[in-house]
Image (cartoon, helix red, strand yellow):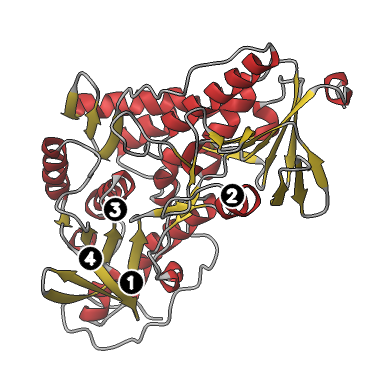
Amino acid sequence: MPEELTNQSAHHVVIIGGGFGGLYAAKSLKNAPVKVTLIDKRNFHLFQPLLYQVATGTLSPADISAPLRGILSNNKNTQVAMGEVLDIDPEQQKLILQNEELNYDTLIVATGVSHHYFGNEQWADVAPGLKTVEDALEMRRRIFMAFEAAEKESNPEKRRAWLTFVVVGGGPTGVELAGALAEIAYSTLKNDFRNIDTTEAQILLLEGIDRILPPYPPELSAKTEASLVDLGVTVRTKTLVTNIENDVVTIRQGEQIEEIPAKTILWAAGVKASRMGQVLAKSTGAELDRTGRVVVQPDLSVAGHPNIFVIGDLANLADKDGKPLPGVAPVAIQEGKYVANLIKSRLTAKSLPAFCYQDYGSLAVIGRNAAVINLPFLRLTGFIAWLIWLFVHIYYLIEFDNKVVVFIQWGWNYLTRKRGARLITGKTSLPLVAVEEASNSRTPLEV
């Protein structure tokens, strides 16, 4: 163990979570006179903004991931540990893990969020969300398996259900998924099958309020919807999902109820806080919002516990307009750096002003040559916005080799319109399909 870590008198900072917030807090403490322990259930950092590209076969998981130990190998005051925190004892300043206990002087909790099905947790198995590598691989399996199953299906109605893709939620993730699905069906795969025409696929994007991309200005939402429609996506706003069962999505639009047969349903409609929010509420009395996020003080600490900080998606901190800061990577990065600087200041008996988020804008990609950018001084759509989106995401990838690989992959995919990571993994057996006399001119494959 490095000498710095054997110094028991050093101020011990424990960080739970190796996402953007936790990782940037650890990186910012590199030269501080502290001992740092970063705990995560996984041994890698995941670049979540590009996770949808794993789900749609553009990139592989390793392209957007990097081992935490490798990232922090030059932080000689930092130790990385795989583990899961079960409870917190703030009085003893102690964490309870599965097989051990760990003392801390300062605690940073950055465990993020998971999917929110608004009380319909039974939908999780039939409508996966997108937060982990496993989620992305399961989505990829379902998307490309749907085309394989449709290729073997002779019944027109069942084939239509296999070629119907429903994306629930019109935020950035939903928009990016829907645009990628349209490119897959109408471009990437259109010459790859013999018994189906993939351009007959139907991609539906459902949003509960009156427009997609709610955080963006209305004019950008309208331009994004127009771009999606040009790609072949059917956008339905003011549409609520009331049930998902037996490969049928039931929706309500006003007083009208409709059932949509669909084999592939992807969830991008909401998030809820990780379990650590409840743990903090029980152990510290922290206030939680309706999604389970921890309401923090202006310096990101928990009320009554100045040495416990919550950052990233798990934290609820209002901006200058009184609205909670969005759950995006730039917020988590800035919060991680701020808390690290606050810790260093406290060690020298200094203080910092309250955290203030610098909003440099938001971006979402729609499809090939199309993106939307909302900057404080500029609003853009189209090709220029798409180029900015590309370079911003490459810039924020953690490791240099990830930047190079992703840049090359994107360049090759742009030239060839192919997606090289279209692998069906996991449960690879096709669902049973009955061989019937086809009612159209297509001849089904023998099963």
Tell me the distance, in whole angstroms, between the alpha carbons under discs 1 and 3.
14 Å
Query: Residue 399: where, in percent of width, then height?
Result: 56, 26
Residue 225 appears anywhere in the view: yes
- Which residue: 21% across, 71% down? 251
Q: Mark 1 and mark 2: span between their CA atoms?
A: 44 Å
Q: Work out whether residue 224 or residue 77 is closer to the camera in this orientation and state it.
A: 77
- Name the residue at the front extreme: 304
Give the amino acid at mark 1: Lys
**Real-space Cα separation, disc 2 to disc 3, in angstroms:** 44 Å
Residue at label 2? 285
Residue 134 position, x and y percent, is 53, 55
Task: Give the residue displayed 74% in from the left and 31% down from the top.
Answer: 105
Inter-mark Cα distance, 4 to 1: 18 Å
Q: Which residue is mark 3?
A: 181
**Given the image, on which type of amino acid does mark 4 rest?**
Leu
Q: CA distance from mark 4 to mark 2?
A: 35 Å
Closer to the camera in the image, 121 or 258: 121
Residue name at image x 25 percent, y 51 percent: 170
